Amino acid sequence: MPIGNRRLPLVLPRYSLTGDLLSFRRCPLQYRYLNGSKLPPSRPVQLWFGEFIHGVLEMSYRIWRDTTPRLSFPWPEHRADWRAEPDPTWATHDIGRIGYSVEQALRAQGKSSRDRDAREAAYRRAFRAVNDIGPHLFPLVVAAEEKIIGTRLVGGGPTQGRTDRYELHGIVDVLTSLTLGMVDRSNLIRTAIQDVTSGLNGNYEVIVDYKGARRPDLADPDRPYWQQGEWQVLTYAWLRGRQPGAIPVAAGVLLYINELSPGQDDIAAMKRALSSNNSDVLPAQGTADWYALTNWRPGLQIPALTDEFRFKRTIRVVPVDQSRVNAALSAFDSVVNEIEQCVTSELVAGTIERQWSPCGDEETCNACDCRYFCPHPAPRGPSLRPVEAPHAP
Ligand code: SF4
């Protein structure tokens, strides 16, 4: 019997939804510098806030789940300097104690807050997230930090690259199980979901994703976060449907945590959205929230917004249906195709900078570790790279 040559093992490129695909969308060149080279960012401060909020919410949920009788809300909060151990008299569910544990874990990975103000804002928002969202979300949770994985064809036409398939993976922050069609309007999250899935009855899952950010504007050509958030939860819904034991996913919920306790930048962005009518949740003219926003000026105290308005801005429900899921999947397939094409052209050309395009977006560049060697950082001209001194004759 003839024995053929042993085939090379099939290795599929792995792509994470948030770590790869959304990062590439933000800036292809930054993605290549950081992810392609496997270089960790030297100052991963942007990561810190999102991971801190995720960590506090996850730990709070586990404490709530494992404590009998159930802990009632609001949970207390003491605050200490990050160097000081929590006082032993603080309760285990004290948000200062939970935050301290999360902060120490992040510090061990080299991640710390940018400054005292950023740390204060993170604790303030964590406190609001646990006490405002926790009572509605925690009773609905069936799984937290659930890994999901699947394979897909690289989209957008032939890549002539390494492979025609890729592996897509992600982590769902929270999976909830709901019986839709029941009349129960005491739970804010359940009510928001029922309002956009009104024709559905029976048992469904809902995917929840925490965003350490404000609610994005509807249209922003430079930062299309509104659309990307929708693509993310719809793709999660598709991946979840491929896991054993999954039941149909009715909706994805994005929780924009900054809206619970907005800062000056968030209020300024809200005010801009109000004047350009560029958000799906804005106060009606003549309401207390409308007056609070229109009378606010940068530097003034953060205006007091009503709970109803803050919660509406926090909770976004994306209904899941096949045509929307297909659109999201094909958008991500095309991104993978673009990445694979960049990889192939880099292999042929042997250079990075012409094969991976810079974003040129001022906000992204200002927070980017690569701006000192990037050839096209915004907004300060063509390059910040040091100029070589001329050779002495
Ligand atoms: S400086 Fe700007 S253009 Fe250059 S890699 Fe960073 S984000 Fe991209």
Image (spheres, grey):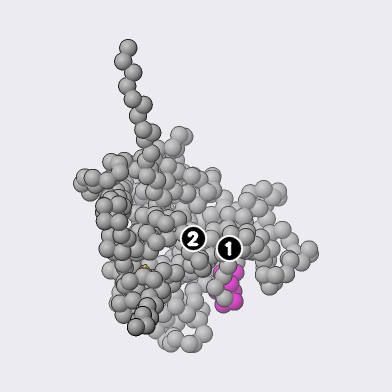
Answer whether labels 1 and 2 touch (C-beta < 8 Å): yes
Q: Looking at the image, can residue 102 be seen?
A: no
Mark 2 close to ligand 1, CB under 8 Å: no
Residue, x 42% and y 46% (percent of image)?
Answer: 169
User: In the image shown, does 91 or 295 lie closer to the viewer?
Assistant: 91
- x 32%, y 12%: residue: 1
**Label located before the other in sequence (1 or 2):** 2
- Left or right side of 326 for 210: right
Kindly report the secondary structure that dominates the magenta region of the rendered protein. Answer: helix
Horizontal side of 269 relative to 185 (left or right) equals left
Direction top: furthest residue: 1
Residue at x 44%, y 37% (from the top left corner): 243
Q: Which residue is mark 1?
A: 110
For the point 66% across and 64% down, which residue is it?
100
| Range shown magenta | 116-124
Reply above or below: 173 against 269. Answer: above
SS assignment at label 1: loop
Q: Position of residue 110 (x, y in %)?
A: 58, 63
In this rendering, the answer to whether 216 lies above or below 162 is below
Circle 2: residue type:
Pro
365 vs 383, nearest the viewer: 383
How packed mark 2 is, by other alpha carbons closer than 10 Å (few <14, some 14-19, many 20 or more), is few
Residue 6 image point, x, y percent? 36, 26
Res. 247 visible in picture: yes
Horizontal side of 43 relative to 219 (left or right) equals: right
Does 117 appear in magenta?
yes
Q: In the figure, residue 393 lies in which quadrant? A: bottom left
Kind of residue sitting beneath label 1? Gly
Alpha-carbon span between mark 1 and mark 2: 10 Å
As helix, strand or loop, the secondary structure at mark 2 comes to loop
Numbered badge on residue 40: 2
